[in-house]
Amino acid sequence: MSAAARPRAATARRGRAAGFTLIEVMAALAILSIGLTWMLRSTANSVRKAEDSRMASVVIDLARGKMYDVEEALAKDGFQETEQSSEGDFEEEGWPQVTWKAVVEKVELPSLDQLTAAATSQATAAGAGSGSGTGAGSDDPFASADSGGGLLGMLAFMGGGVSAEDVAGGSFLASQYQLIQQVLEVSVRKVILTVSWKVLGRVETMDVVAYFTDPGAMNQAIGGFGGAGAGDYGTDGVSPTSTSSGSGTGTPSSGVTGRGSTTTRGTRGGK
């Protein structure tokens, strides 16, 4: 090899030693892409969480104001016998993208027959389980009063039993349950307010549940259930021996003045 060729060969070897191979370049690009993807995902999650927090605060305030509007409407129009529903958005408040739907439901307790059937079924299942475990189970759903099973167990828990006095006590409890059932139906309404909005294209919803009472309707229901003559005379129809007189003025109670507990539940759905 000539003297002129030797420096060129040495320079070529040094150039190859100082460069990167294709595999090294691809590995570096893969690491870079993974890092960028993680950074972008972390940034997107941070933005979404910040937007979630901001909108949650806004929606809570909007829902609170709308619940007050529903309460005022109930106080003005009174409680209706049928279910009521209304919907709209918060464009007047400056949030047209946030929508709401309010449903006013009548609070209904299960009937006494339904409660009796449920208690009987539960007592039957408990008796079958006891019989399979000990060999001495009872087929009578009204048995097991001491153990708290069956209808007599319920009466025993509330001071009842199997004697005539206990049966009378059970009848009294049944009549009181009917009174409570009627009072709740006419004086309590359940309001379900559903608020919906979007966060970065994803639909978010929140349900707010509240119970409102009408003391005036409650008093009317209690008075109507007691009967007209019971308040003036005794149960035997004889005028009481002691009398009293007096005068005074009062204002009738009307409108929705009671507010029940309020709960919120957030759910997340797809676009």
Image: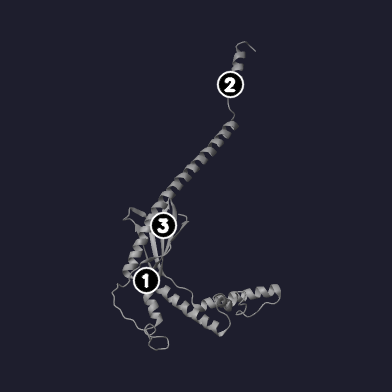
Q: Considering only order in the chain, which callout, 1 or 3, is on the residue closer to the N terminus?
A: 3
The answer to which of 50 and 245 lies nearer the viewer is 245
Residue position marked by numbered label 2 in the rendering = 15
The furthest residue to the top: 3
Q: Considering only order in the chain, which callout, 1 or 2, is on the residue closer to the N terminus?
A: 2
Three-letter residue code for mark 3: Ser
For marks 3 and 1, give the one nearer the viewer: 1
Three-letter residue code for mark 1: Pro
Residue at horizontal 38 percent and vertical 60 percent from the top: 100
Q: CA distance from mark 3 to mark 1?
A: 33 Å
Q: Quadrant of the C terminus?
A: bottom left
Would you say 41 lies left or right of 233 here? right
Neighbour tally class for label 2: few under 14, some 14-19, many 20 plus, Cα within 10 Å:
few
User: Which mark identifies residue 25?
Assistant: none
Q: How is the image coloured?
A: one colour
Would you say 84 lies left or right of 139 here? left
For residue 212, which quarter of the picture?
Answer: bottom left
Q: CA distance from mark 2 to mark 3?
A: 65 Å
The answer to which of 170 and 62 lies nearer the viewer is 170
What percent of the width, then of the height, locates residue 2? Answer: 63, 11
Residue position marked by numbered label 1 in the rendering = 215
Neighbour tally class for label 1: few under 14, some 14-19, many 20 plus, Cα within 10 Å:
some
Q: CA distance from mark 2 to mark 1?
A: 94 Å
What percent of the width, then of the height, locates residue 105? Answer: 41, 69
Three-letter residue code for mark 2: Gly
Q: Quick check: marks 3 and 1 in contact, CB under 8 Å?
A: no
Residue at horizontal 69 percent and vertical 72 percent from the top: 133
Residue position marked by numbered label 3 in the rendering = 196
What percent of the width, then of the height, locates residue 16? Answer: 60, 23
Q: Relative to 126, say whether 23 is above or below.
A: above
SS state under label 1: helix
Would you say 216 lies left or right of 135 here? left
